[in-house]
Amino acid sequence: MKTIHVLGTGCPKCNLLEKNAEIAVRESGLEFEIVKVTDINEIMEFGVMLTPALVVDGVVKSTGKALSVEDIKAFLSRIE
């Protein structure tokens, strides 16, 4: 199963990104596990210095903003 990591310490933007990722996965019909990462040391292991961040299958796709559902779905549609 493919994995989406939502990186963030729990700020409103981080929570919005997690919610939008859940909606995007559900609407896309694809199977992804969503993992919320709140530990700053784990976040830094991804090379991310600005949250919220979205990581799809180990690749950082976005940092510093809460992507829309449509933006996330666009990333998911590019995954084979």
Image (cartoon, grey):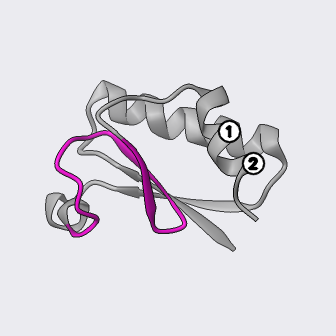
Quarter of the view holding residue 15: top left
Q: Which quarter of the rendered picture does the N terminus lie within?
A: bottom right
- Check the image and report above or below for 7 versus 59: above
Per the image, is 48 magenta? yes
Residue beneath disc 2: 77
What amino acid is at disc 1?
A: Ala
Check disc 2 and give the amino acid type: Ser
Sort mark 1 into few (<14), some (14-19) or many (20+) by Cα contacts within 10 Å.
few
Taking the image as shown, residue 45 lies to the left or right of residue 80, namely left
Within 10 angstroms of label 2, few (less than 14), some, or many (20 or more) residues? Answer: few
The residue located at (80%, 37%) in the rendering is 27
The quarter holding residue 53 reads top left
For disc 1, the marked residue is: 74
Q: Which residues are magenta?
A: 45-62
Image location of residue 77, percent across then percent down: 75, 48
| 38 left or right, relative to 72 | left
Residue at 84% x, 49% y is 29
Label 1 and label 2: CA atoms lie apart by: 5 Å
SS assignment at label 1: helix
In the rendered image, the quadrant that contains the C terminus is bottom right
- On the image, the x and y values in percent for residue 23 come to 67, 35
* CB contact under 8 Å: marks 1 and 2: yes
Looking at the image, which is closer to me, 41 or 74? 74
